[in-house]
Image (cartoon, helix red, strand yellow):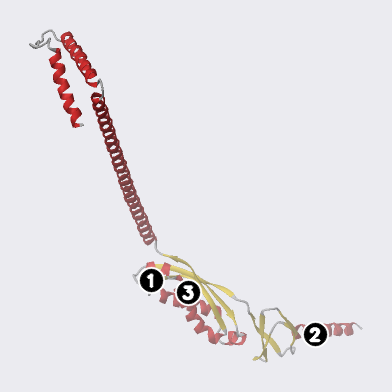
Amino acid sequence: MGGGLILIGIVVVFVVIAIAKTMRIVPQRSAFIVERLGKYNKTLEAGLHILLPFIDKVAYKHTLKEQAVDVAPQMCITKDNISVEVDGILYMQVVDPKNASYGIGNYSFASTQLAQTTMRSVIGKLDLDKTFEERDSINGAIVEAVDAASDPWGVKVTRYEVKNITPPQSIKEAMEKQMKAEREKRAVIAESEGGRQAQINRADGEKQADIARSEGEKMKRINEADGRAAEIRAVALATAEGITEIAKAINAEGGADAVNLRIAEQYISEFGNLAKTNNTMIIPANLSDVAGVVATAKEVIGKMGTQV
């Protein structure tokens, strides 16, 4: 009885092991390589699969997802003989699980080594300053080289990204000094340009102000001249009109007698004022001959009236 139970237990264990060896569940975006008696048989894709127990064996398991492989830092020498440390990330994807299993022993290691070799070659063709500017061309050259070499391995290289380009400390210090000098140079140039523009603006402003002042002075003088001319013209017209009226009044009836009287009054008044302002004076011989003075003035006025 006891021996029968042991036998049943052995059978059950054997069946469980057989089932475990027979059934295989492949996850999504994965591929299993099955060998039958040590020889490639088939590639299992995602899903449930039944294998022959003890005959079929899953020899390789691959993920079909894109993989990011870190490329270790390495020393590269630029075209101008400067040693720089460069590292990066390589992105690849298994597209043929069979070739990835049998085409090469370790496609990930081989791809990173090839990326490092290509990187040294590309960096050696560039000057130090260009290595910082030509990252896209460096990435493209590495992808092209590694992808061509990895095609027989069933691996597709999608892209490569340079992470860091680190020059020696002495070169970094020199570059910092150069950048500082360049910034100071740009600052001095900008300051001088600003001063130059300020001087130009001030000169233009002074020029416009001088023009405006001269225009204002010109208009002022023109206006003053016009005002003086108008004043002189008005005075001349008024004087002429006054003289004309006087002439008319003299030629009128009784005008001559009024003129004689006015001349006599003015003569006597002015002679009296002269006596008040001077201690010494010369008295004309004909001082009492007022009638003669009036007659002389009358003669002059008569001539003026005739001319008018």
Q: Nearer the viewer, residue 128 or 230?
A: 230
Quadrant of residue 27 within the rendered picture: bottom right
Spatial CA distance of label 1 from label 2 is: 63 Å
Name which of mark 1 and mark 2 comes first in the sequence.
2
Q: Where's the N terminus, which quadrant?
A: bottom right
The answer to whether the residue labelled 1 contacts the one labelled 2, judged by CB atoms less than 8 Å apart, is no
Residue 94 versus residue 252 in the image, above or below: below
The answer to whether the residue labelled 2 contacts the one labelled 3, judged by CB atoms less than 8 Å apart, is no
Residue on which disc 1 sits:
77
Residue 35 versus residue 214 in the image, above or below: below
Q: Residue at x 25, y 27 (%)?
A: 248
Q: Nearer the viewer, residue 29 or 202?
A: 202
Q: Position of residue 124 (x, y in %)?
A: 38, 74
Residue 180 versus residue 226 in the image, above or below: below
Q: Position of residue 113 (x, y in %)?
A: 49, 77
The answer to whether the residue labelled 3 contacts the one labelled 1, judged by CB atoms less than 8 Å apart, is no
Name which of mark 3 and mark 1 comes first in the sequence.
1
Q: Nearer the viewer, mark 2 or mark 3?
A: 3
Q: Is residue 263 left or right of residue 136?
A: left
Residue 44 versus residue 85 in the image, above or below: below
Q: Which mark is residue 139?
A: 3
Q: Which mark is residue 14?
A: 2
Q: Nearer the viewer, mark 3 or mark 1?
A: 3
Q: Secondary structure at mark 2?
A: helix
Q: Nearer the viewer, residue 255 or 137?
A: 255
Q: Secondary structure at mark 3?
A: helix
Q: Secondary structure at mark 1?
A: strand
Spatial CA distance of label 2 from label 3 is: 55 Å
**Mark 1 residue crowding within 10 angstroms, few (<14) / some (14–19) / many (20+):** many
